[in-house]
Image (cartoon, rainbow, N blue to C red):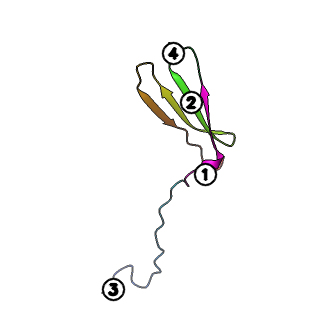
Amino acid sequence: MKHYLHGRVQVPEETLSAPPPAADRLRVAPFTTDSASPNIEVVKQGDKVTRLIVTCTCGERIEIECLYPASG
């Protein structure tokens, strides 16, 4: 008895991932407020915000990645 996949064409699997952003197109714009507030940095790629970097007054740093659907 033959295996049920016998004779079928195998398609190589490709892993999908987002391409790394080009360093020359990234722009970091600090959004600063008074020293008693957290510091927020905005990283843009063209017109899209790709990352927010929030630095708390206590020194803790949180990076938030902004993901958009592939169609937009």
Q: Residue at x 60, y 28 (%)?
A: 30
Q: Which mark is residue 22?
A: 1
Q: CA distance from mark 3 to mark 4?
A: 69 Å
Callout 3 amino acid: Lys
Callout 1 amino acid: Ala
Crowding near pointer 1: few (<14 within 10 Å), some, many (20+)?
Answer: few
Q: Residue at x 51, y 32 (%)?
A: 53
Relative to 3, 66 lies left or right: right
Q: Residue at x 55, y 26 (%)?
A: 40
- The residue tagged 4 is 37
Mark earlier in primary sequence (3, 2): 3
Was residue 48 drawn as part of the magenta stretch in this picture? no
Crowding near pointer 3: few (<14 within 10 Å), some, many (20+)?
Answer: few
Q: CA distance from mark 2 to mark 1?
A: 19 Å
Q: Secondary structure at mark 3?
A: loop
Which is more toward the observer, 45 or 1?
A: 45
- In the figure, residue 4 lies in which quadrant? bottom left
Callout 2 amino acid: Glu
Relative to 6, 25 lies left or right: right
Q: CA distance from mark 3 to mark 2?
A: 61 Å
Q: In the rendered structure, which segment of residues is drawn in magenta?
A: 19-31
- The residue tagged 3 is 2
Relative to 9, 5 lies left or right: left
Q: CA distance from mark 2 to mark 4?
A: 13 Å
